[in-house]
Image (cartoon, rainbow, N blue to C red):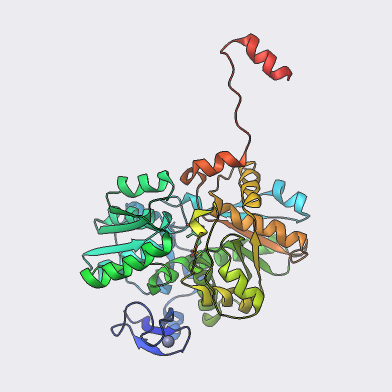
Amino acid sequence: MDKFLGYRCSLCQRQYLSSQIQYTCSDEGGNLDVVLDIEHIRRFVSPSQIFAQPEPSIWRYLPLLPVGDPGFEGTPFRRVGWTPVFETPKLAQPLGLKTLWVKDESRNPTASFKDRASAVVVARAQEIQAEVVVTASTGNAGAALAGMAAAVGQKAVIFAPKTAPPAKVAQLLVFGAQVILVDGNYDSAFDLTIQASQEFGWYCRNTGYNPFTAEGKKTAAFEIWEWWEKTRHQHPSFKRLNVFVSVGDGNIISGIHKGFKDLLELGWIEQMPRIFGVQSTGSAAIYNAFQAGTEQIVPVAANTLADSISVDLPRDGVRAVRAARQSGGSYLAVEDAKILQAIADLGKVGIFAEPAGATAYAGLVQAVQMGLITAEDAVLVLNTGSGLKDVKAAMQAIPQAPIIEPTLDALKKHLAK
Ligand SMILES: *Cc1c(COP(=O)(O)O)cnc(C)c1O
Ligand SMILES: [Zn+2]
């Protein structure tokens, strides 16, 4: 494939050919950025060609991805991405914003943002004829890999902490992956997965390790770009777009940053949106580094109900810090109570988010309170995962339903309360 040139280490800038290396820099373990042949892409495709396509998925951006056409038309694999952007005036108003948009990633085939990464990793696995793809996961990355693998007939092995929410574990099992629950946290599952992939020659999808996950995740930036190109003229008073993303390992925010960097290099945008990362105060290693003005990621002992962003040592922390810093954005850390409140708020406009999904919105609320975002700003918040993934957390976000006798009398008594 002519458009895929190789990799560049995000720490030491060392370049590799695609045949030389598979995961992280052999010098210091830095995350690798995929290097594309921008001139080549520009010669063969234009924004208007991309916009004119009917393909309702991430595969409309195939010319900007480091894989060939994977096929599998008619399967869930071809339905990843192209998620809706909702206007939410009921949320915008109390925040003093003119408009607020929510891009709902719970609409992906396995109900989280992770499908974007898993689809592109599975496409890569098919190209290199990997027999088994393995990943560590707090739940969603595994469910996404299991779902995409099932759709194309690829074998998948998933390591997850035994504390993963039952709905996520059920998804893994229903999709037919080999599931191994680890008596430890996500970080210990992560390390075991790398050991297993080296021992057995399995292709490893681990977040912040396999360079193709960020390439899948960058498709969200492309969709935001395409949507904003078609929307912005209706809102001439807005200055710059601001995108809010919840952050655990830091791979989603890094991928989104990469997508906008690709578009800048192509000359298809003049300026990228400001990117805001949001963590839980109980798992804030990247937030801490951003606030300290460094790229040094110091591990924390993670403790948050937002399981999808509960990480001791973020595996893509450096690029995640840069995403906010280089785009003029920032980082916020929100308490778990604010995350639960955000689930309730999003629910009232018809969007059901899991805790990590609602975290970005909780971050926006805080950014408005801090004056980082004002009425002049256009804002898009990502909901990264479905509330059905973690019903126990959802039930903590709202009052319980009353139980009454099944009689009209009892109903009247209840309604009179
Ligand atoms: C994985 C995940 C995140 C965070 O992504 P990172 O790449 O780990 O920063 C946020 N929300 C949901 C629902 C996720 O599954
Ligand atoms: Zn390096």
Residue 406: which quarter of the image?
A: top right
Query: In the rendered view, would you say 173 is above or below 182?
Result: above
Q: Quadrant of residue 63?
A: bottom left
In the rendered image, the vertical position of residue 292 relative to residue 203, given as above or below: below
Where is residue 49? Give x, y as percent.
Answer: 47, 69
Residue 22, position as x, y percentages in the image: 32, 78
Looking at the image, residue 253 sits to the left or right of residue 417; the answer is left
Q: Is residue 248 visible?
A: yes
Toward the viewer: 84 or 339?
A: 339
Q: Work out whether residue 42 or residue 294 is closer to the camera in this orientation and state it.
A: 294
- How many numbered circles are shown? 0
Q: Nearer the viewer, residue 40 or 15?
A: 15
Report x, y in % for residue 156.
27, 58
- Point out residue 174 in the picture as x, y percentages from the top left corner: 31, 45
Residue shown at 66%/45% (left/top)?
345
- Which residue is at the front of the view, 142 or 15? 142
**Quadrant (top left/top right/bottom left/bottom right) for the N terminus:** bottom left
> Image point 56% across, 69% down: which residue?
285
Q: At 42% across and 55% down in the image, what residue appears?
A: 140
- Name the side, left or right, on which 56 lies relative to 305: left
> Relative to residue 351, is residue 158 drawn left or right?
left
Q: Name the image quarter holding the C terminus.
A: top right
Tell me which corner region of the image, top left, top right, bottom left or bottom right, holds residue 231: bottom right
Q: Establish if 186 lies above or below 66.
A: above
**Residue 87 makes an appearance in the image:** no
